[in-house]
Image (cartoon, rainbow, N blue to C red):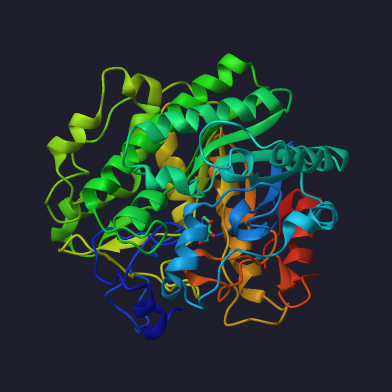
Amino acid sequence: MGNAESFSRRGFIGMAGAVAAGGLLTSTLAGCTPTPQHAKATWTPPASPMRFPKGYVWGAATSAYQIEGAWNEDGRGPSIWDTFCHERGDAIADHSSGDVAADHYHRWRTDLDLLASLGVGGYRFSMAWPRIQPTGSGASNQKGLDFYKGLIDGLLERGIRPAITLYHWDLPQPLQDAGGWPIRDTANRFADYVDIVFGAFSDVDADWFTLNEPKTQAYNGYWYGTDAPGLMEPDKAAATVHHQLLAHGLTVQAFHSHGVKGRIGPVLNLTPVKPTDAAAKEQAKNVDAVQNRLFLDPILKGSYPTDAIGTANGQLPADPGGFAALIHDGDLKTISSPIGVLGVNYYGVAGVDLNGQMVQIHPTSTANWEQIWAPGLYELLTRIKQDYKKTPIVITENGMPDDVLQHGVDDPKRIDYLRSHFQQAARAIQAGVPLEGHYVWALIDNFEWSQGYTQRWGLAQVDYLTQKRTPKKSFGWYRSVIKANAVAPK
Ligand code: IFM
């Protein structure tokens, strides 16, 4: 689990409803070993392997800035992450950047061979907006489009279905200079960008994803300041939520008007929250609104929850009137344009205390925000099934970093983690959840945002001196799961 040093490095201990790179959280229990207070899981996995439906998509995921490198090659423009790393180096644990990362831009062919050797049916990657449209408006960059065309063709040649994320936090810097996500025009700029992408790739039969984790972009980027662009202004965070959702809706509409093949939806990082005290129910409800319903409700119900924004414990402390004023007539209709797939990133659960702060109730991985509790995945999926209209679901990210493992490939904790989460996924399918695939985060070690290269999330290790990839033990274990289309008990 995380130690006191790693908790404090994030610099946002004790904030209500904090999110980290992947989704959650903060802790007031730094350095303690928590008792799993909510581990009353009565369900135990069966003694025989749990099988998945035919056609279930096993996959692995990455994102552009975290692996590509080549930050200023072939016409790519600067993004907010380039600026954040170059100008705010002390905000990154090891003062690094994604300038080179895993050099995937030059090594994508061998990375696709690695994927093929894993036996996956799907690969989720993101397109870098500043590679395709360097300044965030105006002309496109043919070399950027060519790069992704090569990648897509390479996947198809290897029989792997693309799952393409259109935005994974790399906003072109000129758009940030003009105000960034807090201003409405950024959603319109995004619509122009996706118009370029859909014009070029309308024949690509893929699972298309609009924006990755709009929550993390809004809260870490504009509320806690731990991610690019590093602002700490809750009103801007709230505006960022709305404008990203608007960008999402405009993208869904553009997808349909271009007649793009495949299906489209958002990627939301969601988390069950639990009151740590019987008297903290209201606080937990507020945190649930901030963490989950502020994103699920507008997309799947066409309305915003009324308990997410305000000054009560657990709420996003922005001005509710100011937020309401951002919502123009027709926006919620746009945001709730019918989607074909819901991407869910699952990394764990969180407790909520009387102050409405997210606290630790389960052990974490070396990512101190990641409270590991596999039954939470089942709870989350069945809750979505119960509370929202029926939509195919794909787990678009799920994984953990190695335990203080910088140079090894022996990762038994990752195998245990994946096994328990696959079992909960199978259980959810048995309960009628329309779950159609599971992407492990991540295919290879990569740049983990404010944690730089200090955390290793890959199924394959990257030696950053040589850029050599070496499959970890979890890679071989995952390959056998994929081959069997079943997860066996330990
Ligand atoms: O690395 C991130 C990814 O970019 C978004 N989801 C969580 C992962 C782990 O923090």
Between 13 and 173, the one nearer to me in the picture: 173
Between 490 and 326, the one nearer to me in the picture: 326
x and y, in percent, of residue 477 in the image: 75, 64
x and y, in percent, of residue 38 in the image: 35, 64
Q: Is residue 404 above or below residue 453?
A: below
Give the quarter of the image for residue 152.
top right
Q: Is residue 65 above or below residue 2?
A: above
* 228 lies left or right of 134: left
Give the quarter of the image for residue 153.
top right
x and y, in percent, of residue 473 in the image: 75, 72
* 19 lies left or right of 140: left
Tag count in the figure?
A: 0
Q: Is residue 43 visible?
A: no
Quarter holding the C terminus is: bottom right
* 226 lies left or right of 65: left
Q: Residue at x 43, y 79 (%)?
A: 2
Q: Is residue 42 above or below residue 410?
A: above
Between 387 and 65, the one nearer to me in the picture: 65
Residue furthest right in the image: 157
Q: Is residue 11 visible?
A: yes
x and y, in percent, of residue 248 in the image: 45, 32
Q: Residue at x 51, y 34 (%)?
A: 137
Q: Residue at x 75, y 48 (%)?
A: 485
